[in-house]
Amino acid sequence: MLKLKIGLFVFSILSLSCAQIEKWQAGQSAERRVFSTRKVWVRDTTASTNLGFRKINRMQPVAFQNLIISGNAIDSVVALDKNSGQEVWRAPILNGVEASATLINDRLFVGANDGQFYALSAKTGAVIWTFPTRIETLSEPLLEEGVLYFMTGNNTLYALDAATGKQLWLYSRPDTSSLSIRGGSRPAYRAGTIYVGFSDGSVVALLAKTGILKWEKQLNRNKKFRDLDSNPIIENDYLYLIGFDDAIYCLRAATGEQVWRSDRGGYGTPLILGDKLFYATSTNELAALNKANGEKLWSYPLHEGIATSPALYKGLLVFGESNGSLVFLETTKGKSIASFEPGRGVFSPILADEKNSNVYFISNESNLYSIEAKWTFPKHISFLE
């Protein structure tokens, strides 16, 4: 009888499907899993060696079919093969690109440092049309209902027809401050309204079709840096945005009425996950707040510089340190899980490709990286554990 029971047990184990064994193994070893990073390839994105001053490379890479597209702040926008990192096409642009781009179908929309706004073919890099801004563009464009909205370096918000590049309207807000952070706010859209922050510390709501002002609110009145260069985000009826050396705000999107304020300024785009809000502070931290009231839950101190906008990747927060590493944190308490050191820091937001277990970013040295980042489990199954 004992031999029969042992035989039945062994048979039941052997009859398990591979999927069942893998599921069992993952459950048993979840606490022992390891998150690992590995460089797949790295490529210099510049057409020639940069012999001038270091520039801020912060364009978020864009994925299109089998391409990864990124711009450097030196001389061009370049498309590389996603798997090999080999160059597929290059679009020369004087003084390059700092702002992130928007991809719609096979068109790439991006503002550059040469005083032009570009519509490029994502397949070939060919210029479809340009619009003269006569000043650099530092903000990512927004495309809604066939209209492009973007902010230029002289505090002017443009609305262009995306098909032709024809100007529909503009809204300009002069800033008399002698100090300003180098950046620009990507507009947000909700129910026919455009929301955008300006370097004078104000946020405005404009009718998307005409640019007519609905409401405005002065948030940051500091004498030093008043910039609201972060990208505002909207969830339900609430607008969240950050002043650089001031605070992070939650406003009612319909009226601009303040719901809460947390006295710690920041940079980049906040990230909302469930009841939490994550953002990069200007005090060298990555902070987690209660979304409902702005109460601080935890903060992760950076070793080098300030953080880029955080992204979610395989259940972790991932961001770059402007003078340090690519960092992966768990979301509950901000515990460090892994990091990758590219040299000279990361200022660009991360492009996450969870399906292929890859993340992409451009470093401060104009190098575009493809990094494999994934959870791994123990290789051997022990039925006695």
Image (tube, helix red, strand yellow):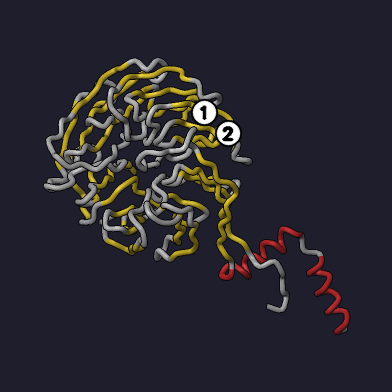
Q: Number of numbered discs present?
A: 2
The furthest residue to the bottom: 2
Q: Nearer the viewer, residue 118 or 268?
A: 118
**In which quadrant of the rendered view does residue 202 lie?**
top left
Please name the residue shown 60% across and 36% down the image.
Answer: 86
Give percent across and percent down for residue 238. 28, 44
Mark 1: which amino acid?
Arg
Q: Is residue 35 above or below residue 250?
A: below
Give percent across and percent down for residue 70. 47, 36
**In which quadrant of the rendered view does residue 331 lie?**
bottom left
Residue linked to disc 1:
90
Please name the residue shown 36% across and 55% down the image.
Answer: 275
Q: Nearer the viewer, residue 148 or 275?
A: 148
Q: Are marks 1 and 2 in contact (CB under 8 Å)?
A: yes
Give percent across and percent down for residue 165. 37, 17
Please name the residue shown 45% across and 57% down the image.
Answer: 327
Residue 142 in sight here: no
Provide the secondary structure element on which disc 1 rests.
strand
The furthest residue to the front: 51
Name the quadrant of the C terminus.
Answer: bottom right
Q: Residues within 10 Å of mark 2 (few under 14, many from 20)?
A: some
Mark 2: which amino acid?
Glu
**In which quadrant of the rendered view does residue 164 lie?**
top left
Provide the secondary structure element on which disc 2 rests.
strand
Residue 291 in sight here: yes
Name the quadrant of the N terminus.
Answer: bottom right
Q: Residues within 10 Å of mark 1 (few under 14, many from 20)?
A: many
Please name the residue shown 23% across and 56% down the image.
Answer: 264
Name the side, left or right, on which 261 lies relative to 59: left
Residue 87 badge = 2
Q: Is residue 90 above or below residue 330?
A: above
Distance, label 1 to label 2, CA atoms, is 8 Å
